[in-house]
Amino acid sequence: MHADLAGESVILWWGLFDSELYVEHETQRYGPYAPISGPIPLHRYRKFKKTKLEKRLERLEALAEVLVLGEPENDGRDAMSLNEVTAELPSQPFRDPDPFHEICFANGIKARLAIADYLGKPLALLTQAQKDWIDNLLDETLEKHKVMQRVRAYFRPHQGQQGSHVT
């Protein structure tokens, strides 16, 4: 094909029983172009091209067949030495009682985000007195349970009714 036709809209002329292809662009016709390979005979199929993953798996399988490891001798020494090694490993407990921040909020910002999420609105929409109350609460504690319990009590004192502090 002509490189000049790259990206252009063309008409392909190829009939049902034709073996050549013609290309028409505007008023000029190019061709005939013969197929690269012959037709596939009946009852024969071309193999699918292998992907990179399939090629890699074949290489690994071939390597695994070459690297056959022998069976270890089972005289009991391997099991004992493994137990001895695991008994000698040093351990160090967590210094922080909550290293994954499951009990306490990581910081005041995370606590404020959780409070805003609970209230369903940004804290900037609260009154100054409510913001001051939240600041005092977070200065006291960052424990999730205590913070959320006190926020519920302050903003929604009666579950069925609108709280008196909510604006």
Image: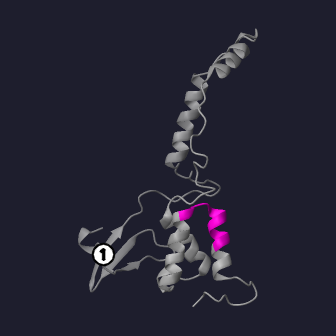
Q: Would residue 80 appear left or right of 123 to someone viewing this image?
A: right
Residue indicated by mark 1: 7
Residue lying farthest to the left in this orientation: 4
Q: Would residue 67 appear left or right of 152 to someone viewing this image?
A: left
Q: Position of residue 3 (x, y in %)?
A: 25, 68
Classify the position of the C terminus by image quarter.
bottom right
Residue 144 magenta-drawn? yes
Q: Position of residue 85 (x, y in %)?
A: 64, 18
Q: Position of residue 126 (x, y in %)?
A: 51, 85
- Mark 1 neighbour class, 10 Å CA radius: few under 14, some 14 to 19, many 20 or more: few
Q: Quadrant of residue 86?
A: top right
Name the residue nearer the viewer: 71 or 124.
Answer: 124
Relative to 74, is 68 above or below? Answer: below
Q: Would residue 147 appear left or right of 135 to someone viewing this image?
A: right
Q: Residue at x 50, y 86 (%)?
A: 127
Q: Residue at x 28, y 86 (%)?
A: 26
Q: Quadrant of residue 79?
A: top right
Tell me where the magenta segment starts and ends, as one range. 140-150
Relative to 148, is 29 above or below? Answer: below
Q: So how many labels did they put on this image?
A: 1
Q: In the rendered view, how is the structure colored?
A: one colour
Q: Residue at x 61, y 29 (%)?
A: 91
Q: Position of residue 149 (x, y in %)?
A: 68, 70
Q: Residue at x 32, y 72 (%)?
A: 31
Classify the position of the N terminus by image quarter.
bottom left
Name the residue nearer the viewer: 135 or 122.
Answer: 135
Name the residue nearer the viewer: 40 or 159.
Answer: 159
Residue 100 magenta-drawn? no
Q: Secondary structure at mark 1?
A: loop
Amino acid marked by disc 1: Gly
Name the residue nearer the viewer: 74 or 120.
Answer: 120
- Judged by its main secondary structure, the magenta piece is helix
